[in-house]
Amino acid sequence: MKKIKFTFHGKDFYADMYPEEAPLTCEAVEKACPFATRWVHAKIVANEVFCSTPIDGPNYRENPIPNVPGDIGFYEMPRNICCWHGDMKPLGTGNVFARFNEKQMEEFHNEALSLWDEPGCLVVVDVVEEDE
């Protein structure tokens, strides 16, 4: 199974990709990887971080489901990957193409909380087979 990998603060975080639910999005993400970008915290939802991307994905929400902690979605405008973590209040649906398992989500959440104090933190995004 392919996983999306986020590397920041010297740590790797892996999430399962959903090629059956979002095949065009997963293909576009994989094609664009690896790339470096910067995390931004989205205050409106509380525990959401996002990063701009070079992904040329579908121009619609391929898998529009309500977001829950651990979801990873792609937004076609302005081409962002969003990661929802911890206690959050979703505002609608996202194009969910990957999800952290419970253990990875907890670890990601704990690390992502520090991004409030470090806006613009560098992150490397890649797609890998299973955990490396």
Image: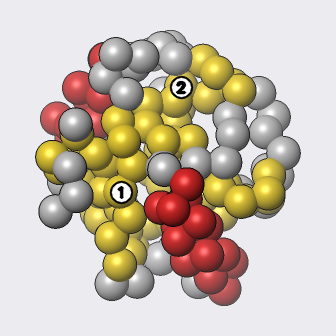
Of residue 67 and residue 132, the one placed in the foreground of this image is 132
Tell which residue pokes out farthest to the front in this image: 103
Residue 48, by quadrant, is: bottom right
The disc label shown at residue 14, or none: 1
- Amino acid type shown at disc 1: Tyr
* 2 versus 108 height, above or below: above
The image position of residue 69, as x and y in percent, is 66, 48
The disc label shown at residue 64, or none: none
Residue drawn at point x = 31 percent, y = 23 percent = 19
The image position of residue 11, as x and y in percent, is 35, 78
State which quarter of the image contains the N terminus. top left
State which quarter of the image contains the C terminus. bottom left
Of residue 25 and residue 86, the one placed in the foreground of this image is 86
The disc label shown at residue 95, or none: 2
Residue drawn at point x = 35 percent, y = 36 percent = 17
Residue drawn at point x = 53 percent, y = 71 percent = 107
* 49 versus 84 height, above or below: below
The image position of residue 108, as x and y in percent, is 52, 67
- Amino acid type shown at disc 2: Asn
Of marks 2 and 1, the one in the foreground:
1
The image position of residue 3, as x and y in percent, is 28, 45
* 72 versus 62 height, above or below: below
- The mark that comes first in sequence, 2 or 1, is 1
Q: In the rendered view, does 25 fall on the left or right side of 35? A: right
Q: In the rendered view, does 59 fall on the left or right side of 2? A: right
- SS for callout 2: strand
Q: In the rendered view, does 7 fall on the left or right side of 87? A: left
Q: Is residue 119 visible?
A: no
